[in-house]
């Protein structure tokens, strides 16, 4: 595995399977009364968030704390960034404080790459979402959730997602989640179809390793998982569809549409959801929707990523097992 996690495309199939397997080990820790491992004691993880976040920030914090790391949470609001401090000066400050890993979310696509390749810091850089570019740990937790649901918790160990058909629906243009998922899911052997209004399909999509469709109803019966994307109004500088009602009618998932999916198929959403827009409350609250499970799986997956980047190879898993046996 590389030293940083910037893009899902940086992961080989074996890297990805190792992360998912390690995340399964970490998930066992979450089932215990004391949800903590000593693995990263004495290491410092900085969460550097320049953009709003609920799930991702809390998830990385919980993950680092469960591994016993010291965690520093930095949010641009209320910091010297609002006085105009640059990414470079912020990075040099973190380096002076001895950060072993920097988890960064930034509104500019490419900011984590810049941080990792600048020489400003020595620690590992983890991309927690950069602009409309990538969100690799979201794709990993999504793959973890799919492997558990579609292959099985124990049966999934060592396995990828070969032959599974995954449909990603909605605002693909502005979605770093979609980009990272297309890379990772195809690396794991899945067949990915994107469904979106033509205005929300990125230019150059023909070079992506996936199919594109404009007809959700036709694709649903052939899907093992359907991932609904949030309509990202904050990134829209133009009218991409006529009305919200029109969007929901053609690209939203309601109970009738969900009934067209195979019985075993799941509905996913990275959150935050626009209930009534891309997903109805009926679907969001049904047991086929994995949104809340994805959040729980996010902590185990991020524990695995931090461990593998900072801690090394097998011992974390052994530690988990050893403690279990005691
Ligand atoms: C996503 C993000 O921030 O890119 N959310 C998340 O990380 N859970 C998707 C979104 O904001 O719609």
Image: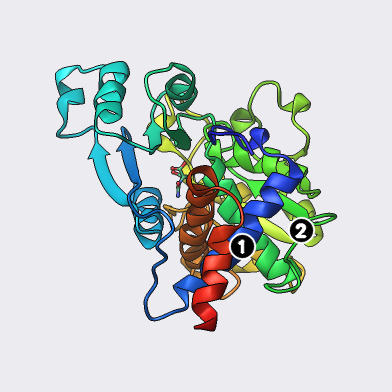
Q: Residue at x 60, y 55 (%)?
A: 142
| Callout 1: SS | helix
Q: Residue at x 38, y 81 (%)?
A: 33
What residue occupies the far right of the structure in this picture? Answer: 163
Instruction: State the image coordinates of residue 230 (x, y, percent, origin top left).
Output: 49, 46
Quadrant (top left/top right/bottom left/bottom right) for the N terminus: top right
Viewer-proximal residue among 111 and 118: 118
Q: Residue at x 53, y 49 (%)?
A: 305
Label annotation for residue 89: none
Instruction: State the image coordinates of residue 293 (x, y, percent, origin top left).
Output: 51, 67
- Earlier in the chain: of badge 1 and badge 2, it is 1
Q: Which residue is mark 2?
A: 223
Query: Which of the 4 image quarters holds residue 86?
Result: top left
Residue 101 visible in rendering: yes
Would you call the spot at circle 1 few (<14 residues within 10 Å), some (14-19), or many (20 or more)?
A: many
Label annotation for residue 145: 1
User: In the shown orientation, is residue 159 left or right of residue 306?
Assistant: right
Cα separation between marks 1 and 2 = 15 Å
Ligand 1: does it lie within 8 Å of the C-beta at label 1? no
Query: Which of the 4 image quarters holds residue 198?
Result: top right
User: In the shown orientation, is residue 286 left or right of residue 53?
Assistant: right
| Image quadrant, ligand 1 | top left
Instruction: State the image coordinates of residue 52 (x, y, percent, origin top left).
Output: 31, 40
Q: Residue at x 32, y 40 (%)?
A: 46
């Amino acid at each position: 595995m590389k030293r940083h996690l910037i893009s899902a495309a940086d992961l080989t199939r074996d890297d990805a399977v190792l992360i998912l397997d390690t995340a399964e080990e970490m998930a066992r820790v979450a089932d215990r009364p004391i949800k903590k491992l000593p693995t990263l004691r004495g290491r410092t993880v900085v969460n550097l968030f320049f953009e709003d976040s609920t799930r991702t920030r809390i998830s990385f914090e919980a993950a680092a704390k469960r591994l016993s790391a010291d965690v520093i949470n930095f949010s641009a609001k209320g910091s010297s960034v609002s006085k105009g401090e640059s990414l470079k000066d912020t990075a040099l400050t973190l380096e002076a404080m001895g950060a072993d890993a920097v988890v960064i979310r930034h509104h500019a696509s490419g900011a984590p790459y810049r941080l990792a390749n600048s020489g400003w810091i020595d620690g590992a850089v983890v991309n927690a979402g950069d602009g409309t570019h990538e969100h690799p740990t979201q794709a990993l937790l999504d793959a973890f959730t799919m492997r558990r649901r579609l292959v099985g918790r124990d049966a999934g160990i060592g396995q990828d997602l070969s032959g599974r058909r995954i449909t990603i629906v909605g605002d693909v243009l502005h979605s770093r989640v979609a980009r990272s998922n297309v890379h990772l899911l195809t690396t794991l052997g899945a067949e990915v179809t994107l469904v979106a209004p033509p205005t929300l399909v990125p230019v150059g999509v023909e070079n992506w390793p996936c199919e594109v469709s404009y007809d959700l109803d036709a694709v649903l019966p052939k899907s093992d998982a359907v991932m609904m994307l949030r309509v990202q109004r904050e990134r829209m500088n133009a009218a991409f569809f006529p009305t919200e009602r029109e969007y929901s009618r053609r690209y939203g998932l309601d109970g009738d549409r969900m009934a067209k999916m195979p019985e075993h198929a799941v509905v996913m959403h990275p959150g935050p959801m626009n209930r009534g827009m891309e997903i109805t409350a009926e679907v969001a609250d049904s047991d086929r929707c994995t949104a809340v499970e994805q959040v729980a799986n996010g902590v185990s997956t991020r524990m695995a990523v931090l461990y593998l980047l900072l801690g090394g190879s097998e011992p974390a898993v052994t530690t988990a097992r050893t403690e279990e046996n005691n």
